[in-house]
Image (spheres, rainbow, N blue to C red):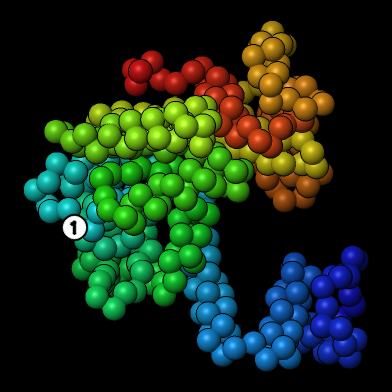
Amino acid sequence: MSPPPRPPRYRTGDSEVDGLILDLLESAGVRRDADLVFEMLVSGVRMGREAVDRGDLKLVNAALKELRYAFRVFEPYSATRKVSIFGSARTEVDDPAYLAARDFGRAIVEHGWMVITGAGPGIMEAGIEGAGVDAAFGVNIVLPFEQEAVAILADDPKLVNYRYFFTRKLTFMKESSAYALLPGGFGTLDEAFELLTLMQTGRSALCPVVLIEPEGSTYWRSWIRFTETELAGRSLISPDDMAFVKVCASTDDAVREICHFYSRYHSMRFVGRRLVLRLHDEPAAAELAELNAEFADIIVGAPISVTDPSPGEIDDDDVPHLPRISFGFDRRSFARLRMLVDRLNGGRDPQLS
């Protein structure tokens, strides 16, 4: 097998071994992205040579196998947007939160979405029940004391079992286009803060995050007060960071907020130093002028302007048919970027204000 046009710089340090790896890839029929597969094999060889502890090798091995399997499970459904539902495994079936999760799962599927849950009881089971098995994925964590996957999803091919929380979380973040959170314990709050951290730092694409407040509950309103007082109030986060979330008093509000986020905005991608936002319709010149004035604080260099798809987007077939705008973006300002997306969508749905 001849080396890729740009040979990987990450190698074993032994040209003969590198050649054997290339021959293996050729024999195995690996041609697409062979440079990346080459580097994964190099990592395995290097860890073996460096006498990495067996426990560490088992961790890397299990994580790679879990992720490979998860990618295979989700790939046939890649064209369908998915929402992750988080909440307590201890919620009883007659709790308003259970009913809200079930109603949300049913409603969002009616809008063409699929749902992802942790596959356990409580809020997770409610979401699956509402969505129906055909429209539900389960990403289950195997623990010594809990939890087995709920019976309605136990034999479904869209169930993935994980040993590690970090690979499970990665699946949630990679596959989701929205997040719906209901009251829960440490795990729910951990998931909430982690996904907000990833969006705040630009390590995850912007997505709508809805905090569903069940009837009679003050859970999320109390959380908002704490976050605004103790975090934003002490300058531990920016007040703008609260733009990442929306408290919704009903499942209808939550579904509307999620769908409204994608009413005009489609997706984003960095191309060099420019941020590209793909849209469902092209802004007029007057709107572009308003956007450049309103969001001048997050523009570095190139102003917001209509642009053609980049060669990379065309090569990847990354929605090249959609209109797009791009600009030089200050990567310290993802909360303001969320506000820009809301502005492109015509502001947040007035029915949710």
Question: Please, which residue is most extreme toward the front here?
Answer: 234
Side of 41 where 112 appears, left or right: left
Where disc 1 sits, the SS reads loop
Q: Number of labelled discs?
A: 1
Side of 138 where 287 appears, left or right: right
**Residue at image location 49% in from the left, 27% down from the top:** 239
**Residue at image location 69% in from the left, 85% down from the top:** 47
Q: Position of residue 275 (x, y in %)?
A: 72, 35
**Residue at image location 27% in from the left, 34% down from the top:** 222
Amino acid carrying label 1: it is Arg
Question: Does residue 246 appear in the picture of this structure?
Answer: no
Which quarter of the picture shows residue 54? bottom right
The foreground one among 155 and 55 is 55
Give the position of the C terminus as an image quadrant: top left
Which quarter of the picture shows residue 259? top left
The foreground one among 333 and 250 is 333
Q: Position of residue 137 (x, y in %)?
A: 37, 59
**Residue at image location 77% in from the left, 50% down from the top:** 315
Question: Please, which residue is most extreme toward the top here?
Answer: 286
The foreground one among 201 and 211 is 201
Q: Position of residue 148 (x, y in %)?
A: 26, 72
Residue at label 1? Answer: 90
Question: Please, which residue is most extreme toward the left here?
Answer: 94
Give the position of the N terminus as an image quadrant: bottom right
Side of 174 where 179 appears, left or right: left
Q: In this rendering, is residue 168 above or below 128?
A: below
Question: Does residue 197 appear in the picture of this structure?
Answer: yes
Q: Residues within 10 Å of mark 1 (few under 14, many from 20)?
A: some
Q: Position of residue 264 (x, y in %)?
A: 54, 26
Q: In this rendering, is residue 152 above or below 127?
A: below
